[in-house]
Amino acid sequence: MRVLAVVPARGGSAGVPLKNLALVGGVPLVTRAVRACRRAELIDQVVVSTDHDGIAETARQAGALVVERPAELSGDTASSESAVLHALDTLGGDPEVVVLVQCTSAFIDPADLSAAVRKVLDGEADSVVSGLPTHEFLWTATGAGVNHDPAFRPRRQDREPQFRENGAFYVMRTSGLRAHGHRFFGRIAVQPVPSRHAIEIDEPEDLELVRALAPFIDEPEPIDVDCVITDFDGVHTDDRAYVDSDGREMVLVSRSDGMGVSLLTRSGVKVLVMSTEQNPVVTARARKLGVPVLQGLADKRTVLRDWLRIENLDPARVAYVGNDVNDLGPMAEVGWPVATPDAHPRVRAAARVVLTRPGGSGAVRELCDRVLAARPEQPVAARPAAATQPVVAPVVAPAVSPVVAGASVRPRPEPVAIGDVLVGDGQPVYVIGEIGINHNGDLDIARRLIDVAADAGCQAVKFQKRTPSICVPEEQKGQIRQTPWGEMTYLEYKERTEFGRDEYTQIAEYCDERGLHWFASPWDVPSVEFLEEMNVLVHKVASAGVADHELLRALAATGKPIILSTGMSTLEEIDAAVEILGTEKLIMMHATSTYPLPPEEANLRTITTLKERYGVPVGYSGHERGLQISLAAVTLGAVCVERHITLDRTMWGSDHAASLEPAGLEHLVRDIRIIEQALGDGVKRVFPGEEAPKARLRRVTV
């Protein structure tokens, strides 16, 4: 061992009680000192010398060795050198260089430590002290110049800098320390440190100052937590409200926050919104994000403490984001208190992390990205699930076909990845707005329908792609049709409404802007090739294509995830399709191809039948009027829901009448998210809202 760092950290302190355990940026000062040493490239080992059990345990957790400091070396008059020499004697075998590091400096740059060590190792100096370059003029109390002649005041640029010792660290050749008994001997050099790192904590005011500065000085680091809890106003919003003439409030939020929260929940991190106010705006936003919300809270701290206990979460592994003084209580309960950059000064000072983006402008997304950065990439099958889906009771499976032989009791199907989204049990329901051919060949209508899907909270939109000369039956090609563009043959009509490369390029770009996936149902092999050139994330097999084995083979060859709709199909036909497609990246959709669908033909229990028979995630593709059947499918375990969408059901075209209008789609997504929350995890417990009624109403007798 060439270089040893010793951190003296006794329990007593005259200026700030138990100063070495004081939190700065959410981290004890002794931990900050140990981390700086461990990150310094040239330091081999770190030792903390202390007389306090709490400091010793904190130091061990930070990765330091601990030397128990005797009482005679722990008083106010004991020198730091005595602690260093005692540590050397205890360890035995002197290193070439010893570094004295003080906890009273909260911002020690590991690079500065290594630079100072290098000066001793290279023989440039025997002792190095950290110092702040300064051009200050110093005076005595009697008005005499200390480092200048008052009669001659040269300009700053004409003066050599002097250095003010800041007490952060001292580097010494160990033999010299042994010989002289103090830290300054032989050739002494200064290691310059920047002013932002040079604050020394001696008084309570110094501690408050470094706490306020920490969020702006500390380098951003990944935030390793299991749960993120946010305030609403000032975190999801810019803390302003827009009020119309009827008194209805609207707020400004960032779309990027939604994707961040989605990625976070898919990675297994719990998310909760807490709000002091009871406001429908908060309810609506939480529903859109697909996360639970607690609002109308007079005492956030108590509610938070109870919620963490119910969810069995370690507070040290929880982040809470706030912006005002009513967030100070819950921030004090968690290991990662976080503030927005425009938060109240007391909130910023209490934060371990201050974000760079304001509320309503991506603050939540920034936090999500930092939490995700701390979570290792996992194979899809191993990623933890956000347990919101129901556990469906098994039913007696139909006779097993050859493609699934030997699977009488199947494990829970693994989710399938579509781009950055997992679709399957335990994941948020993947909602697809099927535009299909409802764009009527008009790119502007297609864009408006994409907006409808994005505004409602869908994750994807789907189109249909055909080569009309192949897909239109010969006997129908010449049939005359009345269309909005006049009289034309059926083939001419299908060609008139079919989008090509230019249109789909613009659709792809617009969907990306709106944060949506897009894909299509190819009806023929050339359409598969076309969609592959457009680099879609997934392919959809329409119910009409289940028995088109040439099409299925072309789709299987892409290696992409496949969504297989099963309308107007027998189990034997589905078996044959699965034989070609395989099950590794397969999602099935229960469907009945009646337009519009009457309730008696919905047969929703087939969702369970398909899941049991094929061992893949199963969703629902609906053609009914209204929302009830689609919502019931979710309660039965549908992992994705697809519905045709239209601007107006009275528009010209074959699919509009069985489609959802914008308000209907918005209500569908809203209600799906409510159902996800309501299904819960199946663990019986007493919730925070029950505590008061329980205390008031519960009668216990023996």
Image (cartoon, rainbow, N blue to C red):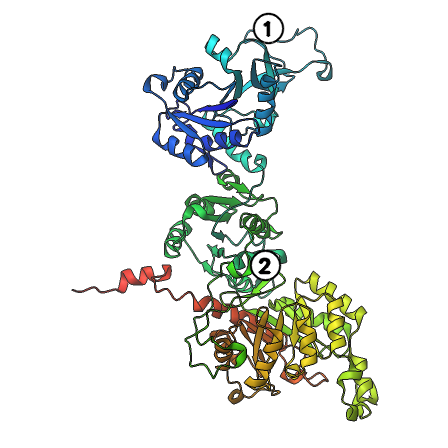
Number of the label disc, if any, that sits on residue 258? 2
For residue 380, what is the image quadrant?
bottom right
Assign a secondary structure to mark 1: loop
Q: In this orientation, does residue 647 appear?
A: no
Which circle's residue, 1 or 2, is located before the other in the chain? 1
Task: Give the x, y percent position of residue 232.
Answer: 52, 54
Assign a secondary structure to mark 2: helix
Task: Give the x, y percent position of residue 54.
Answer: 36, 33
For the C terminus, the quadrant is: bottom left
In the image: residue 409, left or right of residue 107: left
For residue 473, what is the image quadrant?
bottom right
State whether residue 478 is above or below residue 21. Answer: below
Number of the label disc, if any, that sits on residue 308? none
Label 2, residues with CA under 10 Å away: few <14, some 14-19, many ≥20: many
Task: Give the x, y percent position of residue 614.
Answer: 52, 76
Q: Are marks 1 and 2 in contact (CB under 8 Å)?
A: no
For residue 433, what is the image quadrant?
bottom right
Count numbered badges in the picture. Answer: 2
Q: Quick one: 123 or 515, which is closer to the camera? A: 123
Number of the label disc, if any, that sits on residue 144? 1
Label 1 – label 2 distance at C-alpha: 64 Å
Q: Quick one: 399 or 51, which is closer to the camera? A: 399
Which amino acid type is marked by label 1?
Ala
Label 1, residues with CA under 10 Å away: few <14, some 14-19, many ≥20: few
State whether residue 654 is above or below residue 254. Answer: below
Task: Give the x, y percent position of residue 107.
Answer: 54, 30
Which amino acid type is marked by label 2?
Gly
State whether residue 100 is above or below residue 58. Answer: above
Q: Quick one: 89 or 34, which is closer to the camera? A: 89
Q: In this orientation, does residue 446 appear?
A: yes
